[in-house]
Image: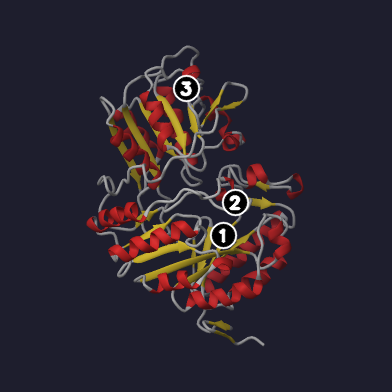
Amino acid sequence: MPEAVLTTPGTNKRSGRRIALVALYPTPDPAMPEFISNHGVRMVEATLRAAALPDLEVVVFDLHDATADELSQALLELDPDVVGFSAYLWSFPMFAEVAVRLRRDDHSRLIIFGGPSAHPAMLNQLPFHDLRSVIDVLIVGEGELTFLEIMTLEDRSPLRLSSVRGIAQWNGAEWHQTKKRPLADLNLLPSPYVMGLVPDGGLGVLQTYRGCPYTCSFCEWGTMESPKRVRTADHLALEFGAMADINVDGALLVDAGLNLNSRAFDQLELAAEQTGFFRHRRLISEVYPAKIQDQHLRFLEGVGEPLVGIGLQSFDNEVLAHVERSFEENRFVANVQALTAVARVAIEIIMGLPGDSPEQFRENYFRAREFPCALRVYHCCVLPSALMVRSPPEHRLNYDPVSLKIRSCLGWTEDDIIGECEFLNGETSRESGSTGEYFWVFSAPAHPIIQAGRSQAA
C-alpha cells in the first residue's frame, strides 16, 4: 500500500452531490458463480435516486475486473465530490490503495467505506493503519439511510459528520463510533430492480429479511440483530416482475437462510406462487438443516433448479462450541436425505476453525463425502466483525492481516494449515474439483454411502 497522506486540519469538504459508488466482484475462478450485481451498492444508489436530491449525479462502478491504476484513473477523470466504496474481503486491499491516491489528489473529496470490511478492527490491522487518516467515514451497519443523510449535509466537516448515526470516525488517536441508526423498514427501501438500475441478465440478488437468530462467531451474520423485519409478498412480487423484465435466469438469496425466519419464508412462498417466478428459474440459498420442515421441501420442489448450501462447518460439537454453533446428528442426516431428494445440495465445512485439529478436520472431510452432495470447504478467515473481535484470547489467532486467512490457532500449527491446504489441492485434482482463493469445491460423489432417502451404513 502506498504511503498515505494525512487529512489536512481545517480542510473544507466539498458540499456537492457528484457521487461515485464503487464495488468489485471477486477475481473470477472456476469455483465462483457468474457475475452478479453488488446489491449493497445498488440499494444505496436506489435510495439516493428515489430521494431526488438537487444536483444529484450518481455514477456506479460495479466492476468485474479492474486494477488499482485503472480504477484510480477513472475516478480522477470523473472527479466526484464523494466516493463510496463497498468493501469486502477481496476488494478491501485494492480500494485502500485507490482511496490513498484520491486523498493525495484532493483532500476536500469525501471518502466513505461501507460493507462487511468497513470496520474499525480492519483498519487497525498494521497494513492499513495509515488508511485510518484517509477515510472520512466508515458506515457501520446498514448503509442506505446513513449515506443519504450524509448527502443531505452541506457541512461535511468531521464535527458535523459526528452527529450522523451509524458511522465511525478516526480522530487521530482512536475510533469514535456514533449512536446506532434505527433499522429501516425494508418495504420502504426502494428496489434497484424495480427502479431499473440493474443490468440485464445473469443472476438476481434477493433479500427477504436482514439479520440472523444465531450468533456463530466465525460469521458476520452473528453480529446483526434477530431478523424481525421482513418484506411483504406484494413488495417481493414487484421485484420478481422487475427481475423477469431484465431476463435474470434465477436469484441468489442473500438471507442468512431460507428457513431461519418463518414470516419471511411465508411471504416469499406467497410471492413465488403469485408470480410463478421460480417455476423455470434457479434459486441459490442457504438452509439451516435443523429447521427443515415439509413446507420448505414443497417450496423447493416447485423451483426450476434449486441449489442449496448447508453450512455444517464441522460434525464435532466440541469444535462447534468454540464458535457458538451446535450439531444434531440424527436430524442432520434425515434432513440432508430429504433435501437431496428435491434439490442439488452442497455441504459446507471450514478448515482451520479454532479448537479443531487436522485429524478431526480430515475425518469431517471424508464423512462429508459419504453424502450424495457436493462439498465446499472454506479456509477459515478472521472476519472483521466476527472472529477478529469476538474470538477469546485462548484461540491464539494468527492470521494474514490482508487476506485474513488463518495461519495458526488453537489446535492448528502453521505446518498443519499448510498441510491441509496441500491435501485439499490434491483432492480437487484427484476428483476434478475446483480451487478458489478461499475455498475448494467438490462435486457429489458417484457412489455415496448415505443416499437420498436411505443409508447404506450399518
The mark tally for this picture is 3
The residue labelled by disc 3 is 161
Q: Quadrant of residue 321?
A: bottom right
Q: Quadrant of residue 269?
A: bottom left
Vertical placement of 228 versus 445: above or below?
A: above
What residue sits 25% from the left and 46% below the top?
196
10 Å crowding of disc 2: few (<14), some (14-19), many (20+): many
Q: CA distance from mark 1 to mark 2?
A: 8 Å
The one nearer the camera, 70 or 154, is 154
SS for callout 3: helix
Residues under numbered marks 1 and 2 in contact, where contact means CB atoms less than 8 Å apart: yes
Residue 443: horizontal and vertical position, in percent? 48, 73
Nearer the observer: mark 2 or 3; the answer is 3
The residue labelled by disc 2 is 381
Marks 3 and 1, the one that precedes in the sequence: 3
Q: CA distance from mark 2 to mark 3?
A: 32 Å
